[in-house]
């Protein structure tokens, strides 16, 4: 038997409910995509998807986290340049994640400029 902390379970269920994630029946490999959901950032010229994927925590345990993928609306030919942006520490609970913030575009430095330049 194992015990699940009530707070951890509640946080997981809240994330699943708010984001519409289904528990993944997978090997939980780091980098494995669990789900994606197109979302409107309220900014012109860009499309965005909130993604959930597996990673590992500091104790090397599997952990599901969220992130954002943002791309310009225009469909230029050829390869795209990519920027991987990571934020500093924002808090220790799920609701602190920038990818879950309703104003993601507003709190992400230079997002509009990066998209305008084709990243």
Image (cartoon, rainbow, N blue to C red):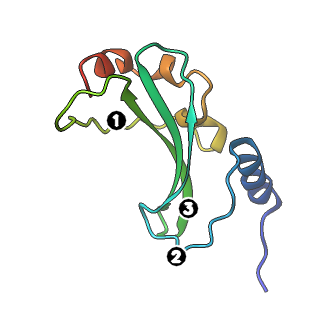
Percent position (x, y) of residue 42? Answer: 55, 16
Point out the image quarter for the C terminus. top left
Question: Is tag 2's residue or tag 3's residue first in the polypeptide sequence?
Answer: 2
Name the front one of labels 2 and 3: 2
Question: Is tag 1's residue or tag 3's residue first in the polypeptide sequence?
Answer: 3
Read off the residue under disc 3. 63
What residue is shown at x 52% (from left), y 76% (from top)?
27
Spatial CA distance of label 1 from label 2 is 27 Å
Percent position (x, y) of residue 65? Answer: 55, 52
Evaluate if marks 1 and 3 touch, with contact meaning CB atoms under 8 Å apart.
no
Read off the residue under disc 2. 27
Evaluate if marks 1 and 2 touch, with contact meaning CB atoms under 8 Å apart.
no
Q: Residues within 10 Å of mark 2 (few under 14, many from 20)?
A: few
What residue is shown at x 20% (from left), y 31% (from top)?
77
**Secondary structure beneath disc 2?**
loop
Spatial CA distance of label 1 from label 3 is 20 Å
Picture quadrant of residue 97: top right
Name the front one of labels 1 and 2: 2
What residue is shown at x 34% (from left), y 35% (from top)?
85
Q: Is residue 76 left or right of residue 96?
A: left
Q: Is residue 76 left or right of residue 57?
A: left
Read off the residue under disc 1. 85
What residue is shown at x 52% (from left), y 46% (from top)?
51
Q: Is residue 39 left or right of residue 72?
A: right
């Amino acid at each position: 038997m194992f015990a699940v902390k009530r707070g951890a379970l509640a946080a997981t269920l809240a994330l699943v409910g708010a984001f519409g994630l289904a528990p993944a029946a997978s090997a939980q490999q780091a980098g494995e995509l669990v789900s994606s959901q197109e979302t409107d950032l309220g900014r012109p010229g860009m499309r965005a998807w909130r993604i959930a994927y597996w990673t590992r925590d500091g104790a090397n345990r599997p952990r599901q986290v969220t992130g954002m993928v943002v791309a310009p609306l225009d469909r230029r030919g050829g390869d795209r340049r990519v920027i991987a942006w990571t934020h500093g520490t924002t808090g220790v609970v799920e609701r602190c994640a920038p990818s879950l913030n309703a104003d993601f575009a507003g709190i992400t430095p230079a997002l509009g400029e990066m998209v305008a330049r084709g990243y």
